[in-house]
């Protein structure tokens, strides 16, 4: 791996670490699927590197994608099956199945009425653009120096 690739991956790992910290701090971890899915990777196309982050499909809903709510108030209620799964993960149970159904309905209704506030964490990528440019610049100079040193060493051997 060359210095550019190493620097981009290190930057991506730190970025993902900070994104995970936001989610944990804001108590947005139920199953851990979103946290486990966040992973930086490099794409190299036509002499260009691109740093991407893989993530679970529901990441954009948690983040809100620039909106104040990940589920806006006054919209339809979320599916009961999803609420019941969340309740199970969080250890929320009723006395019996009927009671559990009632609790799930009340949660659905509240979300439908009040919505769910977003937990922005994807903005870190844009917020740190200048930092990324500096990382790329330093790595590029290092890579160029190493390439020139190798070239000069090869010439001296001849």
Image (cartoon, rainbow, N blue to C red):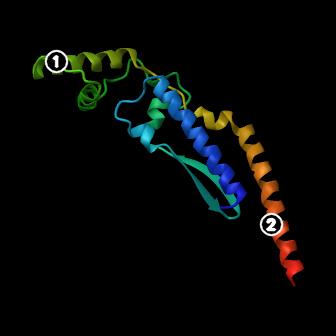
**Quadrant of the image for the N terminus?**
bottom right
The answer to whether 97 appears left or right of 104 in the picture is left
Residue 40 vertical position relative to residue 85 in the rendered view, above or below = below
The answer to whether 144 appears left or right of 28 in the picture is right
**Quadrant of the image for the C terminus?**
bottom right
Q: Does label 2 or label 1 sit earlier along the sequence?
A: 1
| Residue at x 66% of width, y 54% of height | 6
Which residue is labeled 1 in the image?
A: 94
Residue 16: quarter of image: top right
Residue 112, percent from left and from top: 34, 19
Residue 120, percent from left and from top: 54, 28
How far is mark 2 from mark 1, CA to CA? 66 Å
Q: Which mark is residue 147?
A: 2
Q: Nearer the viewer, residue 106 or 145?
A: 145
The answer to whether 134 appears left or right of 38 in the picture is right
Residue 95 vertical position relative to residue 147 in the rendered view, above or below = above
Tell which tag, 2 or 1, sits nearer the viewer: 2
Residue 58: quarter of image: top left
Label 2, secondary structure: give it.
helix
């Amino acid at each position: 791996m060359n210095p550019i690739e190493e620097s981009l991956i290190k930057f991506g790992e730190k970025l993902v670490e900070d994104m995970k910290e936001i989610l944990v701090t804001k108590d947005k971890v139920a199953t851990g699927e979103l946290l486990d899915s966040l992973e930086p990777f490099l794409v190299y196309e036509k002499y260009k590197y691109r740093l991407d982050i893989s993530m679970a499909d529901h990441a954009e809903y948690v983040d809100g994608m620039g909106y104040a709510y990940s589920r806006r108030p006054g919209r339809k209620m979320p599916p009961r099956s999803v609420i019941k799964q969340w309740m199970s993960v969080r250890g929320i149970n009723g006395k019996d199945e009927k009671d559990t159904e009632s609790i799930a309905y009340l949660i659905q209704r509240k979300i439908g009425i009040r919505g769910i506030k977003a937990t922005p964490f994807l903005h870190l990528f844009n917020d740190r653009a200048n930092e990324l440019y500096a990382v790329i610049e330093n790595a590029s100079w290092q890579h160029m120096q190493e390439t020139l040193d190798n070239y000069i060493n090869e010439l001296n051997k001849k």
